[in-house]
Every structure is written in structure tokens, then in C-alpha cells.
Amino acid sequence: MIRFEAVEKWFGQHQVLAGVTGEVKRGEVVTLLGSSGSGKSTLIRTVTRLEGIQGGQVLFEGVDVAGRGVDINRLRQRVGFVFQAFNLFPHLSALGNITLGLERLRKMRKAAARERAMTELDRVGLADKADALPSRLSGGQRQRVAIARALAMDPDVMLFDEPTSALDPEMVNEVLRVMRTLAQNGMTMVVVTHEIGFAREVADTVWFLDKGQIVESGPPAEVLDDPRHDRLRSFLSRAR
Amino acid sequence: MGYVFDPAAVLTGQYLDWFIWGLATTIALTVAAWLLGMTIGIILTLVRMLPFRSLEWLVAGYVEYHRNVPLLVQILVWYFGVPQLLPRAIRMWVNSHHSEFLLAMVALGLASAAYITEDLRSGIRSIPKTQYEAARSIGFNYLQAMSYVILPQALRIVIPPLINQTLLLFKNTSLAMAIGVGELTYRTREVDSYTFKTFEAFAVATVLYLAISFAIMALGSFADRRLKLEIR
Amino acid sequence: MLEILEDNWLLFLIGQYPHGPVGGLAMTLFLAVAGLSLSFPVAIALALARLSPRRWLRGPATAVVYVVRGLPLIMFIFWTYFALPLLTGHAVGGVETLLFALVIYEASYLSEIIRAGIEGLPKGQAEAAKALGLGYFPTTFKVILPQVLHNMMPSLVSQFVSTIKETSLGYVISANEVTFAASQVNNQLMTQPFEVYGLLALTYFTLCFTLTSAARWLERRLAAERGGLGAQPA
């Protein structure tokens, strides 16, 4: 579904992605691990062209996302993106955050959009917060609304950029629970995270990035319990 | 002193009419200059967001001129100076059509535009880039992201300073008296010189000015409370 | 334009002096400097009164600030123009009138800046001073205000620019400052108003823009001092 082919990216003189190659299959849950600065966030941001690349290709369903004739806005509707800092729209209620895309992009009628949004809110356990402004929600609740906002667009794949890193510890689980359910229902997911436990339990595949490259990948049991790389070994020991 | 303060003496007959006309002119001048200032202010804001350095400098020059020259002097330049530059036919036409009101409106409007564009720009700049990113991630294009996500937020930030700008503009219309526009201050002096009831005349004008100013201030603090978004 | 400047630069700069009173740009600057300096103590008093827990202090001070904010400066100048002779018992000239009006007007705007500065200071400063056993006045004048005044240097320069611009209203009551001087030159020449007033605008612009730039520079320096690079100007 998503293929990275020798993807390279520089920020000025600094190379963040140094030839990343890998594939995410339909229905697969891929977890990206790596210390900060390893390029894992940048990698998933290239999928929806939040970051441009200087070398290689990113393919979504076989089509180069940077290719000519690609309607990037259409593509983004099919790829849900969840940010570390939630990025809810502060001037809209939880419900309004979700209906905005449904009404303006899916051209749904108000009532239908509302109904759909309520379904999504219910799915993340926040139906009772529909009318609350983001400022009235806790961090965990905000992130769940952000997930609902992305899900409402019926994406083919969900990308998560450190979804729990900005949360207080006691709120991490409520978000992970939502993501776990999502994975169990067969959603294709790419998750950048520091939650080793989540990776072990939910992921089909783990990619370990270091210095802009995938240095190890495979099923979690293999990668996490029998790391071959020193960098990964020290990363895991620090994470514990 | 045997002096009796008697506002009623200036609130009868033609004097009352003068006050009413003065107030009406003040309000008309405020509204007209506001509309002009807002229009030009928005245009300037859009122009300076275009990726051309030269245009950006041009707008910056415009802003600096209007902020660093006294408004009264700007009005004098427009009233005494600019008609001199116009072709004779237009000058004649302008002079016979209440040129003082028109030119005061232009001077006040252009000056307001300089302040308005600064407010608008800082409003838009204060919206974090991540909001734009989030909007694009849902699949909105540039214009949609602007109109559904960025501008609605910027507007909330910008409305309180714009209301304050309106208050300043309202007060500044009084400077138009210097070129003979029959607004409230001008009419007040007229009433004064006809009746010699100086304190009464100015008391009436003061109450009128304060009433409207306080109404604008109240609107401002209401907007401030209502629109304040707790971001994060 | 140069010719006008050549013939009238003295009138522009110093008015009729030494054959008459000082005027022109010199008077403009004097009015602005004196206006702002004299308004300063008044502004501090107003700010402290507005922050006072005592209602009889806070009430009147708040009223003054709001009335000044709500009234055009020109109205204020006229009130002074009529009331000052009555209060003092003798005739008062245009310059004195303008100066008096400016002091009150500027004082209430300045007081708002000072008040915001005091409120913006970390609460710990006042608490630390009190913990040392300092009373209200030492706390305020030795600990709080020095910091506030330091932080508000840029605003102070901006306020100085505003004051310079406001002195132009001397024109309306024939106070002999530079706008009035320009109008006199214009009355003599009759035929070149654009040049005369253009020159006047240019004079103000040069003066005020220089000061505005200085204020920005100060603001950047203060921001750097606070360690916040590229902090937002006030």
C-alpha cells in the first residue's frame, strides 16, 4: 500500500533520510522505532508530502505521491494523519473538528455529517464531549478526537506521529486502547512511537531507524527480543 | 461667581440641530473612513503576503509614513496639498463637492489602513503553522485551509485590536475640524461662539463623545471575552 | 521645494526667535520632551492608584484613564484652553495650554503601560521584597518600578513619538510649534501648499521614524537580554 524506495531527504546540509526502502502492506501495522533525530517522523510525513524529498520515491498504491497529476488533497483524504500535538482546531468543538472535513470535502449534509461524526466520537468513547471546545478537553481526550477526525474521512491507512509523546503518563493508555482496537479491526497503520509495549503487542512489523536508515525490520518478537544491532540493543535497554 | 451651568441653553432650536448634524457628520466620517481603511487594509495585507520583496517594501513604506507623520499633518497635506496636484477640472469638481469631507475621509481612511494591515498581519502570523498542516492533512487545499481553519482563528485574534482601531478612528475624526468639516467638535465651537455658553457647549460634546467611545470600548471588552480562545 | 526651505528654514526650526517667541521644530521638541517628562510622575501615581486595593484611590484614577481614552485630544485641549485661565486667574498662552493638556493625556496612556508592566512582572518579585521585610514604598520604588521602567523603555520611546505627533495639534490653538509655523509659511506663499506641507510631513517622518527604529532596536535588545530570541515586540 505504501512503498518507500531509496527515500532521501536533507534539511540543509543535514541528511535526515539516507535511502529508506520498505513496504507497508494493506492491513499491516508497522511500528517505527528509533531515537529522536533518526528520521522516523520525517519518513511518515513524506507520505502525504508534508515533507518533500530530494531522492527516491514514495509510492501510495503504486503511484508516486510527488508525481505529476497526483491530487495531493485527494490523497490526503485517504491517508489519516495523527499529530503528536493533536492540532485540533481550537475554534471548533470536538464535533465541529470532525464535521468540517465531512461537510466541506465529502459534501455531506449537516445532519448526515453530524451523525457520522457522532459515530466516530462514540468509537473513541467521547460521544458525551461532542460540544466541548478543545480547550475543555484533556490531552488524552484531544488526541482521541484527533483520531476520530482522521477516521471520519474513511482513510485507507492511518499514520500516527508519536501520538502519545505529548501526553501525561496516565492518559497514554486511553489513546493506545483506541489504536489497539483500530488495529484489531484491520486498519492499515504506521505508528511512530516510543511505546515498546505497544509495538510488541500490536505491530505486525517493527522498523528500527537509525541515522536516516532502516537498520532492522521484522516481526516484533524477532526485532525486539533478539536485536542484532548494537544501536537497537542500547535503544531498547534505555527504553526499558 | 453667579455663573449658572445650564446645558439646556445650548440644546434648543438651531443649536440642537447643530449638535445633531455635528454628531451625524462625525459618525458618517467614522463609518466612511472605516470602510475605506478596512478595504485598503485588507488589500495591503494580501499584497504583502505575496512572495515579492519589492511589494513588501512598498507596503512597509506605506505603513511607516502613516504611522510616523501626525494625522493632522496628513489631513493638511490632503486638504491643502493634493488638490494642487490634480488637473484643474477635477480640482474644481472636488472643491464644489464638499471636498473637505471627502479629503478628510481619504486621509483618515488611508491612515487607518496602515494600522489595520499591521493588526491583520500579526493576527494571521499568530496562528501556529501546525494548524495549517493539520488542515492540509485532512485534505483541504490552500484556500480551504485558509478560509475554514486559519482565517476564522485569525479573525478572533484580530477583532479586539480592530475595535480599538475603530475607537481611535472615531476620536480622530475630530481632527477634521481643522479643515472645516462640520463634525461634532467643529459644531461645538460654533455653538460656543454664538451662545458664549462655552462650558455647556463643550459639556454636551464631551458627553456625546464619551457615550460613543464607551460603547465601542464595551464592545471591545465583550469581544475580548467572547472570542478569546484558549489554545493549548 | 528647496527654495522654500532656503527662505524659511529658520522659521521652521525656531520660529520667530530671536525677534519673537521660540517656535517651530524647537518648540515641538520642547513640548514633546516636557510633556512626556512631566507626565511621568503623574503616570506612576495613576498606575499605582489603579492597582490599589483602596477603592477611593482606584475609582477616580480609573475614571480619569477612561475619560481620557474616550475623548479626542482636541476636546481635551479645548477644555484646558477654557478652564485653565479660570482656574489660575490669568491668561494662559497656547503653548502652556497644549503642554498642560498633553501632560494629562500622556499620563493616562503611560499609566496603562506602567500598570501592564507591573502586572506582567512575576509575582515572586513583590513577594521576595516583602519577605525581606520591605514595606510598600520601598518594594514599589526600589524593586518593582526599576524593573518595569527598564522593560518599558521601548514603549516609552514609542510614547515619545506619539507625543511628538500630538504636539501638531498646537496648530488648532495657534501654539507656535512646527505645524503652526508651516501653516504660516503656507499663508505667505499661498501657491505651494503641497511643497510646504510635504516638507512638514517629511520633517516629522524623519524625526519619528528614527525614533521608531530606535524603539525597535531597544525592543530586540531587551528580548535578547531576556534570553528569548526573536520575542514578539510589545
Image: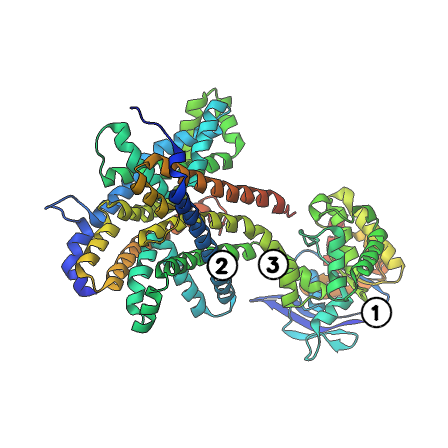
Residues behind callouts 2 and 3 on a single chain: yes
- The kind of residue on which mark 2 rests is Leu
Can you give x and y, in whole percent of width and height, for residue C107 in the image? 37, 36
Lower sequence index among marks 2 and 3: 2
In depth, the one of B184 and B215 nearer the eye is: B184
Q: Nearer the viewer, mark 2 or mark 3?
A: 2
- Can you tell which mark lies on residue A25? 1
Can you give x and y, in whole percent of width and height, for residue A91 in the image? 67, 52
Residue to which mark 2 is pinned:
B35
Where on the picture, by quarter, is residue A208?
bottom right
Instruction: Decide if residue B47 is on the left or right side of residue B135.
Output: left
| Helix, strand or loop under label 2 | helix
- The kind of residue on which mark 3 rests is Leu
Q: Can you see residue C144? A: no
In the displayed structure, C134 sits above or below C225; it is: above
Chain letter belonging to callout 3: B
Instruction: Decide if residue C175 is on the left or right side of residue A203.
Output: left
Chain letter belonging to callout 2: B
- The kind of residue on which mark 1 rests is Lys
Residue to which mark 3 is pinned:
B151
Q: Nearer the viewer, mark 1 or mark 2?
A: 2
In depth, the one of B47 and C119 nearer the eye is: B47
What whole-number distance in Å separates the C-alpha atoms at marks 1 and 3? 39 Å
Q: Residue at x 67, y 56 (%)?
A: A36
Can you give x and y, in whole percent of width and height, for residue B128 in the image? 60, 55
Q: Quadrant of the N terminus of chain B?
A: top left
| Helix, strand or loop under label 1 | loop
For this orientation, the residue located farthest to the left is: C19
Chain letter belonging to callout 1: A
In the displayed structure, C81 sits above or below C28; it is: above
